Image (tube, rainbow, N blue to C red):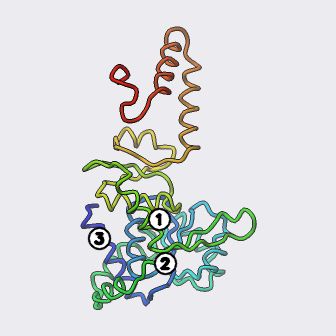
Amino acid sequence: FSASEVVDDANLISYALFDMGLNKGDKLSIISPNRPEWVITNMGIMEAGCINVPIYPTISQNDLVYILNDAEVKYVFVPGQELYDKVNAVRSKLSGLIDIITFDNVEGATDWNSLLVKGRECKNKEKLEEIKASIDTHDCATILYTSGTTGNPKGVMLSHNNLLSNAIANKDAALFGKDWKVLSFLPLNHVFERMLTVLYLYQGLSIYYAESMDKIADNLKEVQPNCFASVPRLLEKVYERIVAQGHELTGIKKQLFFWALNIGFRYELNGANGWWYE
């Protein structure tokens, strides 16, 4: 997807939502791993004045029912058959759900491409600019639910300003280069990756989505990104795996491995180690 395609498709999603009778403040949910359609749909939802309530694909059935009812979600977006079946299995318990929309083609389901067609056929495209102009920075943009480990999940409301201010504040701190590539693998449901996505788009970076957590290493080799965002525990697991492989070595190979590792420990940013280290 080019930048213009992302903008055009997000607008088409907004037009389709208007055609489906949705109004400012209505809630929709995305239940999907990271993929371009996630970001485009999220943009279409928010610029239409609606509220995205993202849910982790691994959620339990009980929490799924609770969140969708508590947030009064009207439409759910899922990637394909598996999650379509998961939501459809509890549909009778969802009082406000109107339809389940799939990013991929699923027999008998409304698919994402049909929304793009609906958006192109929309007769009231001027409404989008009116809605965008009416959105206040402090209006709710998304509701993120906790894991519910101490009872029912609890929703945290974040405004448009909450998401944008973090990205704008970090635009100078993050030293991105022109035409940089980034690999995204932290879940878009989490506010950290959501904020970073806004920052990446704001800075004009190209975003590549990892196929899965198990394939991150392969995707890093394939994409060769300039950077990626992570969390400490994931980096600790990578380090532990590398060190474990080092301990399996013998002789000079083992000595060289840990010599190189110790050299790495002494690295300082901005050339502070001196020319001899570089």
Q: Earlier in the sequence, mark 1 or mark 2?
A: 2
Looking at the picture, which amino acid does disc 1 mark? Pro
Q: Position of residue 231 (x, y in %)?
A: 53, 47
Q: Farthest right residue? A: 150
Residue contact at pointers 3 and 2, CB within 8 angstroms: no
- Inspect the image, locate mark 3, and give the three-letter code of the amino acid beneath it: Val
Judged left or right of residue 227, residue 89 is right
Residue closer to the observer: 107 or 83: 83
Picture coordinates of residue 187, whole percent (x, y): 51, 57
- Give the numbered dot on residue 97: none
Quadrant housing residue 9: bottom left
Left or right of 186, for residue 129? left
Q: Secondary structure at mark 2?
A: strand
* Of the two numbered discs 1 and 2 in the rendering, the one whose residue sits closer to the viewer: 2
Label 1, residues with CA under 10 Å away: few <14, some 14-19, many ≥20: many
Residue for point 45% across, 70% down:
102
Residue sitting at 48 percent across and 14 percent down?
256
Q: Does residue 35 lie above or below 256 as drawn?
A: below
How far apart, in angstroms, are the residues tagged by discs 3 and 1? 20 Å
* Pick the front one: 37 or 43: 43
User: Which disc, if any, is residue 79?
Assistant: 1
Q: What is the C-alpha distance between the residues marked 3 and 2? A: 18 Å
Q: Which residue is mark 2?
A: 51
Q: Earlier in the sequence, mark 3 or mark 1?
A: 3
Gap between marks 1 and 2 measured at Cα? 19 Å
Circle 2 crowding by C-alpha within 10 Å: few under 14, some 14–19, many from 20: many
Instruction: Give the residue type at disc 2.
Output: Ile
Q: Quadrant of residue 65?
A: bottom right
- In the image, residue 159 lies at what x, y percent? 49, 74
SS for callout 3: helix
Residue underneath mark 3:
7
